[in-house]
Image: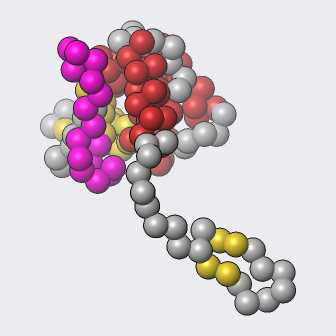
């Protein structure tokens, strides 16, 4: 399985590969490097996300079989959730990147559908 990772360049730019979000998966060592934390801090943040019910292990994790055991990788949703749970400068950079991408001024078309009955709601 080919997978992509997120990384931060030396000049502080966030690099997220332009692939489908299912292709971006990172293992624990890569996440430790991305967020500049020690493994116990990352594991505590991950446990907190699961305990709060934000994500479930069966959706956030994937086990890749190896010759001796398996490797656990985490999806993009978990990576972003961890960015909001960890308090380091790289995590802050990723949070700011995510928020700035959400509010980029880009023209887009909004298609709205109206229900035909009297108690209609606007769905966009």
Identity of the residue drawn at 54% across and 23% down:
85
Name the foreground residue: 62 vs 109. Answer: 109
Name the foreground residue: 65 vs 6. Answer: 6
* Residue 102 x/y as whole percent: 47, 43
Q: Which residues are magenta?
A: 8-24
Q: Residue furthest right?
A: 118
How many marks are shown on the rendered structure? 0
Q: Quadrant of residue 114?
A: bottom right
* Residue 115 x/y as whole percent: 71, 84
* Residue 7 x/y as whole percent: 26, 26
Identity of the residue drawn at 49% across and 35% down:
99
Height in image: 61 above or below 10? below
The colour scheme applied to this rendered structure is secondary structure
* Side of 40 where 50 appears, left or right: right
* Side of 80 where 11 appears, left or right: left
Name the foreground residue: 80 vs 46. Answer: 80
Q: Is residue 47 visible?
A: no
Identity of the residue drawn at 23% across and 47% down:
18
């Amino acid at each position: 399985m080919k997978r992509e990772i997120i990384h931060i360049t030396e000049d502080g730019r966030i690099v997220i590969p332009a692939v489908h979000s299912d292709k971006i998966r990172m293992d624990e060592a890569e996440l430790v490097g991305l967020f500049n934390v020690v493994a116990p801090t990352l594991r505590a943040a991950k446990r907190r996300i699961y305990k709060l019910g934000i994500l479930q292990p069966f959706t956030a994790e994937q086990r890749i079989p190896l010759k001796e055991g398996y490797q656990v990788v985490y999806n993009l949703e978990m990576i972003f959730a961890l960015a909001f749970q960890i308090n380091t400068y790289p995590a802050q950079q990723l949070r700011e990147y995510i928020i700035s991408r959400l509010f980029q001024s880009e023209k887009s078309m909004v298609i709205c559908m109206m229900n035909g009955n009297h108690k209609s709601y606007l769905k966009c």
